Image: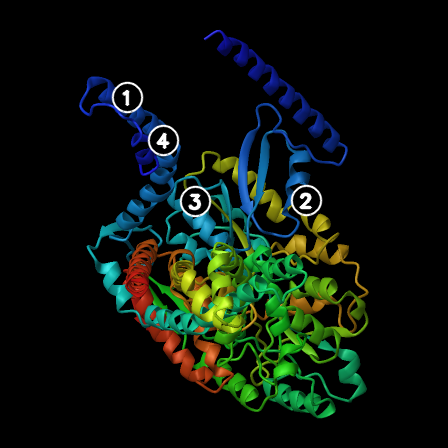
């Protein structure tokens, strides 16, 4: 009894001490251009994200703002646990104000009912975004997210080796097969690129190009068409490349893959715009070897796939949606953001004026051939219509499971695709969704 | 409670006298106080989550139309259990862990038993160094160990494909490859357990056997192994449960090969249902079923062990 008041005062003074030292620490950090405590009276906005460099963007925002203070929590990348964490938080009613949703994950997150409708807040920005990104945040005609970047796929290739051996850059998939055979002839250990079978997001990007969207929202019904003509054409082409042993199977981003890219065992990469940064980081000594081109096409009709791409949503239960919107508008459209981004990566913003800023800020020097942003711009222009479905993330793991036996000859890509279509339809119906099989009515 | 029993025994007082009852009550009370931290943890971290899982397993989320208006919770009785039991992916997962157990349990137990007997025999020098060397893999976090092995298994940068002539990540070889990681990890741990049990074998019996002319092998086979049989059975039970719950090793290898599916083991099935498909009801039902299977199998092994030692 006697002790408790003493303890209390001691506790208080200790807390006071902690507060003072935290303030000191904050003061020390201010020199490094970031404030770690909310200014008095500011509205705090919490954000969960795995975007590279988000800490730098948040610090820059907080440094310029008095009324809104953003608190960042870095979470695991989406398919490695980030989506599960956000979905669980929404279910538990303790989601952050701002959620990280890629275009491919947006409809699946929407099934939780946890996102705020941003149609009115975003209406004035439509003309400033790349159409593919704008469509990506509007699966059903309402706006559910703020686009951050766009990730069109391009063909990265070893221009030095292609030139040295007189192999022309393939512009169609038929030419691609010829080039693949030529690469193998020059070096029996080398392949034109890898076609990783356990990466559903990659295969979706390849199919996107073929112009047959896997999902379309038609009124109140999902039309599901994963084994459509374009996707089967893609599957048949790559099945023959695999059967003829013209492509490698190594998983992108692994040590095996990095070694192959650097050692001249892989002469190309079908990768998204963010691979510009990946190449610079994983094989920095390869300066002056690689060049970029838009994806080879089916019979010359310009078309390009997309793999990934980030947007942000606001929680339906957020207590500070206006403040969150202030931050997201800044993040998506303020020219400082691509300038900061260019210091550590190669951003390709969805916001067109910002893309021009990123192009200006790009240092260059790594790639041969056409300027990086010219190729990416052209690729982005070629992206056909696409809608992600409410089971896209789960479908990626179904794809990887179903494609597993392809390399051993247990099944073929077209066969597997037909099974995936059945699986996806059954899965969506089991959830109670309204589903129509096949293409649009 | 069993701890209190021997303490009460020496009290030599007339049973039924008020003093004795009072003291017993006081002791019960003291026991209860001492058990409180345990009970709190048991209730909050085991019983409540188990009950919550049982509760979750009876519900599902139903959507309608495009699904964007959010889910509705629906009570489905045992519907989730039915759909898990009817799911080929769940059967395939059980088949995989059964095969894994067939490869892993004998090789790991025989390996650690042999190593423990060697350590216990007089032939080994530098005993501490050897036991440490075999034990170290257990101290390596499973994910790190899995990654190291995944790099060794990788066809172009790892040496194993060249050494064996077989791609360790191919369809046929991936199960033995995973069993190898687990065996590497657990052999040292079980060796230490067996070695400790062997230390408790009375020296007189071993000496008597030697005096009767038994050699090293005979002593090990006829004296030492039978004497530590209860320990071996406990190790078998733990390994059976561990095999059923196999998760980390295949999860790590999944990033390196398409051969390991997202539902390759029952635990991965639960993970996929909860965190990829977002179907908590099915995940809860699958984990309850997995727990029941674990309990049944351990009961069978225990029954078998008591019958054998009689």
Mark sitting earlier along the chain (3/2): 2
- State whether discs 1 and 3 lie on one chain: no
Are dots 1 and 2 in contact, CB under 8 Å?
Answer: no
Extreme top residue here? A2
Chain at numbered mark 3: A
Q: Would residue A208 be found to the left or right of residue A160 on screen? A: left
Residue A439 seen from this side? no
Nearer the camera: disc 3 or disc 2: 3
SS of the residue at dot 4?
A: helix
Q: Is residue B225 visible?
A: yes
Chain of the residue where label 2 is placed in the rendered structure? A
Residue at 35%, 72% (x, y): give it. Answer: A423
Residue position marked by numbered label 2 in the rendering: A56
Q: Quadrant of the N terminus of chain A?
A: top left
Q: Report the chain holding disc 4.
A: B
Callouts 3 and 2 close, C-beta under 8 Å = no
Q: CA distance from mark 3 to mark 2?
A: 25 Å
| Callout 2 secondary element | helix
Q: Is residue B143 above or below residue A125?
A: below
Task: Classify mark 4: residues with Cα within 10 Å, few (<14), some (14-19) or many (20+).
Answer: few
Circle 3: element type:
helix
Q: Residues within 10 Å of mark 1 (few under 14, many from 20)?
A: few
Residue with the mark numbered 3: A89
Q: Mark 1 belongs to which subunit? A: B
- Residue B23: image tag: 1
Q: Are marks 1 and 3 in contact (CB under 8 Å)?
A: no
The disc, 4 or 1, on the residue closer to the chain's N-terminal end is 1
Q: How dense is the environment of label 3, judged by Cα within 10 Å: few (below 14), some, or many (20 and up)?
A: some
Element on which disc 1 rests: helix
Look at discs 4 and 2 and give the one toward the viewer.
4
Of A362 and B258, the residue lying toward us: B258
Determine which residue is flagged by label 4.
Answer: B36
């Amino acid at each position: 009894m006697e002790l408790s008041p003493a303890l209390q005062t001691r506790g208080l003074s200790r807390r006071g001490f902690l507060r003072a030292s935290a303030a000191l620490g904050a003061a020390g950090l201010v020199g490094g251009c970031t404030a770690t405590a909310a200014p008095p009276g500011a509205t705090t906005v919490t954000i969960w994200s795995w975007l590279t460099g988000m800490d730098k963007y948040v610090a820059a925002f907080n440094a310029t703002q008095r009324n809104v203070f953003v608190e960042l929590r870095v979470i695991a990348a989406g398919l490695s646990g980030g989506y599960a964490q956000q979905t669980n938080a929404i279910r538990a009613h303790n989601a952050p104000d701002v959620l990280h949703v890629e275009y491919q994950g947006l409809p699946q997150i929407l099934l939780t009912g946890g996102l705020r409708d941003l149609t009115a807040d975003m209406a004035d920005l439509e003309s400033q975004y790349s159409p593919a990104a704008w469509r990506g945040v509007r699966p059903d005609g309402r706006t559910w997210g703020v686009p951050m970047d766009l990730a069109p796929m391009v063909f990265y290739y070893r221009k030095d080796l292609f030139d040295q051996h007189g192999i022309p850059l393939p512009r169609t998939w038929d030419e691609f097969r010829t080039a693949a055979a030529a690469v193998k002839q020059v070096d029996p250990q080398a392949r034109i690129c890898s076609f990783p079978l356990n990466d559903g997001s990659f295969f979706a990007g390849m199919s996107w190009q073929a112009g047959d969207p896997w999902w379309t929202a038609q009124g109140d019904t999902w039309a599901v068409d994963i084994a459509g003509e374009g996707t089967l054409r893609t599957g048949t082409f790559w099945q023959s490349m695999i059967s003829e042993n013209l492509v490698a199977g190594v998983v992108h981003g692994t040590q095996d893959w990095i070694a192959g890219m650097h050692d001249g065992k892989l002469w190309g990469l079908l990768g998204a715009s963010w691979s510009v940064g990946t190449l610079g980081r994983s094989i920095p000594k390869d300066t002056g070897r690689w060049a970029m081109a838009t994806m080879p096409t089916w019979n010359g009709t310009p078309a390009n796939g997309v793999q990934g791409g980030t947007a942000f949503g606001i929680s339906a239960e957020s207590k500070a949606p206006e403040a969150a919107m202030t931050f997201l508008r800044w993040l998506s459209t303020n020219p400082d953001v691509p300038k900061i981004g260019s210091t550590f990566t190669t951003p390709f913003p969805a916001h067109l004026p910002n893309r021009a800023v990123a192009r200006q800020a790009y240092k260059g020097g790594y790639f041969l051939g056409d300027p990086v942003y010219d190729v990416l711009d052209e690729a982005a222009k070629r992206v056909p219509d696409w809608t992600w479905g409410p089971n896209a993330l789960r479908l990626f793991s179904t794809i990887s499971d179903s494609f597993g036996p392809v390399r051993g000859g247990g099944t073929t890509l077209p066969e597997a695709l037909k099974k995936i279509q059945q699986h996806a339809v059954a899965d969506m119906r089991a959830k109670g969704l309204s589903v129509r099989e096949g293409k649009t009515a | 409670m069993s701890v209190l029993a021997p303490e009460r025994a020496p009290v030599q007082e007339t049973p039924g006298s008020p003093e004795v009852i009072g003291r017993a009550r006081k002791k019960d009370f003291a026991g209860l106080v001492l058990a409180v931290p345990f009970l709190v943890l048991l209730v909050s971290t085991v019983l409540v989550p188990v009950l919550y899982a049982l509760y979750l397993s009876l519900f599902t989320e139903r959507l309608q139309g495009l699904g964007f208006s959010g889910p509705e919770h629906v009570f489905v009785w045992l519907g989730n259990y039915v759909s898990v039991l009817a799911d080929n992916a769940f059967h395939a997962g059980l088949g995989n862990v059964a095969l894994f157990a067939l490869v892993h349990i004998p090789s790991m137990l025989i390996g650690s038993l042999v190593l423990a007997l060697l350590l216990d025999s007089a032939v080994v020098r530098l005993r501490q160094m050897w036991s440490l060397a075999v034990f170290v893999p257990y101290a390596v976090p499973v994910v790190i160990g899995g990654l190291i092995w995944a790099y060794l298994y990788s066809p172009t940068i790892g040496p194993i494909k060249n050494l064996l002539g077989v791609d360790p990540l191919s369809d046929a070889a991936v199960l033995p490859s995973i069993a190898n990681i687990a065996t590497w990890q657990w052999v040292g741990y079980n060796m230490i357990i067996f070695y400790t049990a062997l230390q408790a074998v009375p020296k007189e019996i071993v000496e008597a056997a030697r005096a009767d002319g038994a050699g090293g092998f005979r002593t090990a086979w006829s004296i030492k192994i039978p004497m530590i049989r209860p320990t071996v059975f406990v190790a078998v039970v733990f390994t059976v449960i561990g095999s059923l719950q196999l998760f980390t090793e295949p999860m790590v290898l999944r990033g390196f090969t398409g051969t390991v599916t997202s539902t390759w083991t029952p635990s991965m099935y639960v993970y996929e249902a909860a965190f990829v498909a977002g179907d908590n009801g099915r995940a809860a039902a699958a984990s309850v079923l997995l727990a029941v299977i674990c309990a049944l199998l351990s009961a069978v092994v225990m029954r078998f062990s008591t019958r054998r030692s009689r």
